[in-house]
Image: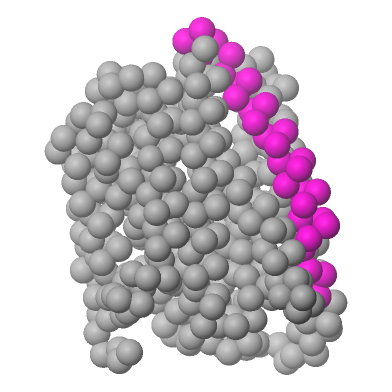
Amino acid sequence: MDSSKTASRKGLIGTYAFLFTSSALNMTSGILAYIMLTYPEVSQTNVAMLLTIPAIVGTFVAFISGTMVNRFGVKKVTLFAHITQFLSGMIFLFFGNRSHILVLYAASALYGFSLGGATVIQAQLFKEVIPDESERGKYLGFGSSVKSIGGVAMSTAGGMIAAVNNGAHWERAYLLYLFMILMIVLEFICLPDNKESIVETKKRKKGVRLPLKVWLISVHYLFYFLFLYVFSLNISEYVITTHALGTSAEAGLCLSALTVGGIISGMVYGTYSRILKKWTMPVLLAVSCAGLAMVVFIPDIIVLYIASVLLGVAMMGTGPYVTIELARITDADSYTNAMSVYSGFMNGGMMFAVYILAFLASLFFHDANSVDGKFMIAFVGNILVFLTSIPLFAAGKTE
């Protein structure tokens, strides 16, 4: 058997092990309403910071993650990121529901190291494991599916565990984080430790300038994720309290439907991206607009599941496309830095989402906690993101 092929397969196992639990924050989204009941003295916006603090920390980590990968190697950074994610879950498990919310804020901050580095780590792992650029897009798509499958497992199982006794012991959902131990072991055994690439990177000259389009794409993605993150931030309240459509189990299923969409998108990414070509990004953004429209105008649990699938298709399809597009417009010296900038702006969208959406809901709906108002704002904002994607990704581009 070809040794290079064996190495690639082994590397893919380690890469997919990292991706499998990288959507673990979805579980917290699904049980957020129960956490809010545990801290009635804390405003809903401040409890929701359990979802935004990882993005805040992750934003800063994202901007330095490329440098970290270049200096220490992608394997070491991957292991560090995953271990911090695991420790975050252990704090929620052993201290959640019985300690001050500041303790959970600290755990959320710890999760930010994984969230901030994930995009750069994923891109670099696939670049080292799959050197053939023509094949990489397909495996990136499969990676999105693996990430989504892990998200389905954790959000669904976590929601069911948390719903026992009406959420009295929601912290037990974080028992699922123990599964990360196996994933960390697989990463340690299977991931490549390419010391030669680290040496080569250190020899490259510093101060590499990024193309303007890298910054435009990154800013565009900031707004896309800002509006799209309304779903993860508010779906628990939307289902459990605002429209009384179910419990945390149903909210968890909504997030699972989101990741089911991601699985579908990742599995067939290679096919539809070849067909759509330069229109891949605008079409996926149009799909996300359709999903948000269903949430806004048809508050029904079955419709919500369908909308979640559409949002998952869009979310998990845009990531591989942008990763490949950044590789196309940069060289080897600037690619990792470009991924850091893109990841930083993407996490920035998640970081500012809770505050901007609350401000806009207060401005236009006179209630900063209006869940329906936040979804309407996100729907309109996402339409603008879709319209601007046409000149950014499709106009003037030949394929």
Residue 131's spot in the image, x, y percent? 64, 81
Which quarter shows the C terminus?
bottom left
Residue placed most toward the observer, 304 or 149 = 149
Residue at 39 percent of width and 19 percent of height: 247
Vertical side of 27 occupied by 145: above or below: below
Residue placed most toward the observer, 71 or 16 = 16
Residue placed most toward the observer, 209 or 15 = 15
- Say how the picture is coloured: one colour
Residue placed most toward the observer, 291 or 45 = 291
Q: Is 191 placed left or right of 172 in the picture? A: right
Vertical side of 7 occupied by 87: above or below: above
Residue 182 forms part of the magenta stretch: yes
Residue 127 forms part of the magenta stretch: no
Residue at 50 percent of width and 21 percent of height: 160
Residue 44's spot in the image, x, y percent? 42, 27
Q: Is residue 52 visible?
A: yes
Residue 361's spot in the image, x, y percent? 26, 39
Residue at 55 percent of width and 20 percent of height: 161
Q: Residue 7's image quarter?
A: bottom right
Vertical side of 3 occupied by 19: above or below: above
Q: Is residue 225 visible?
A: no
Which region is colored magenta? 165-194
Q: Is 105 placed left or right of 7 in the picture? A: left
Q: Residue furthest front?
A: 1
Q: Residue furthest top?
A: 165
Q: Residue 359's image quarter?
A: top left
Q: Residue 349's image quarter?
A: bottom left
Residue 253's spot in the image, x, y percent? 40, 31
